[in-house]
Amino acid sequence: MAKKATTRNFEIEDLILNKPTLKYLVIPPQRVDVVIEVTTTGILTASQVASTKMERLEKAAKKALAMYEQVISEEAEVLDVKVGKLVLVGKIKEAEAMVQGANQSIKKALLSAEGAAQKAIQSLLKDEAQKDSSLKEARVRTVLKWTAGGISLATSVAKLVATHGADVTSYISIAKQLKTLAEDVQQQMKAEDELRKDLVVNVQAYFASREKILVEFAKRQLVDMSKINASDPIGSIDAIAAKVAAVGGAAAKGRSLVQIAKDVHGIVSNGVTPILTKAETSRKAYREHTTKTRHKTDGISAEADKLDKAMKAAKTLKLGVQIGAQCMSVKRSARAMAVKLDNRETFLQEMQKIMAGEGMEIDDRTTLQKLKELDKLTIASEIKDIYSFASGIKDLISAVS
């Protein structure tokens, strides 16, 4: 019989989504292009291998590859500490050699990634074949293409070591980067207020729509809503179903109380799905904004660390102590901002649970209180402080030059 093949292509723009905070090293994007090819004979045609099956195979591959994110991140963190010890005593060549050695180790680890992804996909396909006779003869092939640069020593750090702290332009380079990062965060936060409002408005619209559908259904069934709290969806559904069952006749249509409640639940779920989808889109947009802001904040802290170390090493620089104090202020504000961003991400995880599925089990009043809490998690003061300190550092170093 002729062989039929179905392929699924996807890309991972950067395998290291959560890059560790490094003082001396830089990890460039680790892009992966993945091709999964499932070949069958006889029963299936290419178009009949369900896209849902291919999606599950993709998830299996991504899960297998995720472990390599941890491998690279942990390698980089250990390496950063070792390189730092060499940098501080001026051994730049030894530091660079150590970085290159680590890159070779990482490359070897990545070579095994294709086999790991293939094994994970084969395992899932084998499991599904036990339940699906049409997949008995299926074969799978996985191909990975890496577009990844190696870990490298940060340019500003290398220059500082090479000049033994004598070249003030090296300090200016770090100070400029610090101010640029602060400006980026300040600019990014201009969109935060609008994204937060979208989330609140869309969640509230979801609640209002669900309540409206419940009330309209009750009116059609001639049910009195005067003693029913529509903000408690489960309670409302049970109460409406009980009243419809009590009326009986044409309203009940011979259905049991359980069946009536199930039908009301389905009607409400179908009605609110588009609005719930919109609310979830808003939540994801806000979550992504929060995550990006946190990454930028980590970058600010890392640059302040570099400059702080450089100031301590440059004993002949008159303003070194003052600049170092400003760096400490930047790091304190960045830490405070990071804590608040973590709180926001925890809040958004809670919102995910609230909006999961139809969300019928939630009490709207409690959820709206949570939404109000979001406004209290402001990071405006930290942003203002970070930008002010970063600008001051740049001015101080410019004055030295």
Image: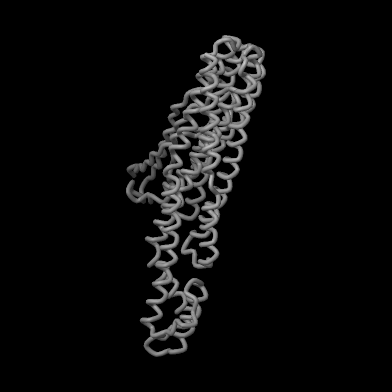
Q: Nearer the viewer, residue 232 or 13?
A: 232
Q: Nearer the viewer, residue 127 or 41?
A: 127
* Residue 221 position by quadrant: bottom left
Residue 150 x/y as whole percent: 51, 22
Q: Is residue 76 visible?
A: no
Residue 363 x/y as whole percent: 53, 67
Relative height, residue 232 to residue 373 (above, below): below
Residue 204 x/y as whole percent: 44, 62
Lateral position of residue 4 relative to residue 175, left or right:
left
Disc count in the image? 0
- What colouring method underlies this structural image? one colour
Lateral position of residue 87 relative to residue 236, left or right:
right
Q: Nearer the viewer, residue 393 or 371?
A: 393
Q: Nearer the viewer, residue 310 or 67?
A: 310
Q: Is residue 95 visible?
A: yes
Q: Which residue: 61% across, 37% down?
A: 335
* Residue 13 position by quadrant: top left
Relative height, residue 177 to residue 35 (above, below): above
Q: Which residue: 47% across, 23% down?
A: 149
Relative height, residue 342 to residue 242 (above, below): above
Residue 287 x/y as whole percent: 48, 47
* Residue 217 position by quadrant: bottom left
* Quadrant in which the N terminus is drawn: top left
